[in-house]
Structures are given as C-alpha cells and as structure tokens.
Amino acid sequence: MRSLDVTPDVVRAWRPEVPGVAEVLHAAWHEHAYPAHTHDTWAVLIVDRGLIGYGLDGQEHAAQHTGVTVLPPGVVHDGRSVTATGFRKRVVYLEPTVLDDGLVGRAVDAPLVLDDTLRARFVGLDRALTVREDLAAEGLLALVTEGLAWHLSGRPTPPREPPAASTARRARDLLDADPARPVRLAEVAGELGVTVPHLVRAFTRELGLPPHRYLVGRRLDMARRRLLAGEPAADVATATGFHDQAHLTRHFRRLLRTTPGRYQRGVNPAVG
C-alpha cells in the first residue's frame, strides 16, 4: 500500500513560445520506471526530490539534486526511481541545434554537470518559462546553454568580449526606441554584433538589471500613464507590450503591491 505522505503522481507539460525550447515537463512520480527510448531533442533536467537511476548508452548514471543533467538527442536511455518516495524533476527539452552535435559524446560520457551557478540559472529559466516571461527565458536559456557547452567542451578559456559599457548603452537605446514592441534578445544581439550571453552580462553589469527587467520597467511606466489617463486596463496591457491584463497585473503587484484597477481608481490596497 502506498504511504499516505507520498505525493501523488503529477505530470505537466507544455510548449513555450521561446525559440530553441521544444517542450517543458514537470513530473513527480512515486513508482515509475520508463523503458529505453530516445529523444530528438536535448533533455536538460534537475531533480528537486529523490534520485533517478538511468542507463545512458549502456552505462549506469544517477540524476541527483546537486547538479544539472543533460541527455543528448538520439542516445538510448531509460530511468527509474531509486528512492522509496519517488522523485520530482523539471525538464527543458531543447531543439537539437541549440547545442553543437560535437558535444553529444561528451554528454554521453559525463551527463551530470555539477555547477551551482548553472543550476540556479536553470531554475530561473524554468520559472520564466512557467510564467511566460519569454524575454527573461530567452536570456537565461542563452546563459544555460553557454554554461553547458563550456562544461561539455572541457571548460576552455572564454574568448575576449567587447566592452560592456558600449554594448549596454547601445542595447538600451534599441529597447528605448519602442519599448512596447515585441522583441527578441537574439535580434538585439544581432544588431550589435554580439552574442546573447554577452548582451545579458554586459547589460546587467552596467545597468544593474538584465534586459528583460529593464524593459518591463519601461512598459510599466507607459502603462501607469495610460491608466491614469483613463484607458481600460486590458487595452493598456496589450498596448504596452504585456501578454494580457493578467500579465500586467502580475508585474504591477510585484512593483507597486496593487492592481492596475486600484491604481487607476486611486484606491489604497491596504484599506480599499
């Protein structure tokens, strides 16, 4: 009989609108062993609870909560719970072109990457994908894949990067030109002739926050002016670059601890 304190099996999957991401999977399984199979994508995952034993190309490995596991496309693997209470994992499946084919062999030999910074960035990526913060997800995806490639390539000396101040200034000018316009970091980086990871690092270093948070701030400024001019919140959301009113409301609460409607009416959330 299953213990009463065991979390029920849960599976949630979706396909984000972020280039390079094929699928996201959150799974919590108690008694589950999946048979040998392959993916046509890279599977990058973390384990939040428990331990997963798996065979990869005939060799036994374990996915644990202290690192990031990367499984290459086209390589046979299986999996099973090693702990009595099962496991919980989060997986981001990446299109095969996101990482170089030459890294497949390295991933087969050493699929577990022990890097606290990389794991933290993966957690941030998963969070951004979960709440549909696509621009944040794009930046974090670039940092995660760069980190994976660096580890799988034997941790070579990074190439010299362009000056951060110039990159940040030019990127800010591009974002300021039309803050409400849908934008991809790859588009901005391409305009500047730099990589997305360098863009994110340079922007964060010089301005104190990453590009997506800067852009959200600019959009909130525009939204506040429109709300105080009497425009409906739903119209304001779409006009200022948010997905919808719920997206605008989430950021409003994070910054101002109130909703667009209360802000527009001048209501103190503590009393009204």
Image (cartoon, helix red, strand yellow):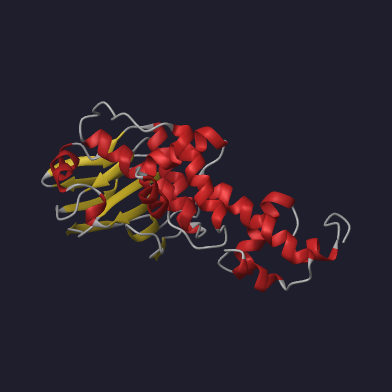
Image location (x, y in percent) of residue 6: 46, 53
Of residues 56 and 136, the one drawn nearer to the viewer in this rendering: 136
Residue at the image position 32 percent from the left and 37 percent from the top = 147
Residue 110 visible in image? yes
Of residues 80 and 100, the one drawn nearer to the viewer in this rendering: 100
Q: Is residue 177 left or right of residue 257?
A: left
For the view shown, which residue lies furthest in the right direction?
271
User: Where 62 sits versus 115, above or below?
Assistant: below
Residue at the image position 37 percent from the left and 54 percent from the top = 30
Image location (x, y in percent) of residue 220: 66, 56
For the view shown, which residue lies furthest in the left direction?
58
Total labels drawn = 0
Image location (x, y in percent) of residue 96: 22, 55
Of residues 244 and 231, the one drawn nearer to the viewer in this rendering: 231
Image location (x, y in percent) of residue 129: 45, 56
Residue 49 visible in image? no
Q: Quadrant of the N terminus?
A: bottom left
For the view shown, which residue lies furthest in the top direction?
157
Residue at the image position 47 percent from the left and 54 percent from the top = 135
User: Where 157 sits versus 167, above or below?
Assistant: above
Q: Quadrant of residue 14?
A: bottom left
User: Where 238 sits versus 118, above or below?
Assistant: below
Residue at the image position 40 percent from the left and 32 percent from the top = 116
Q: In this view, does 270 lie to the left or right of 80?
A: right
Q: Quadrant of the C terminus?
A: bottom right
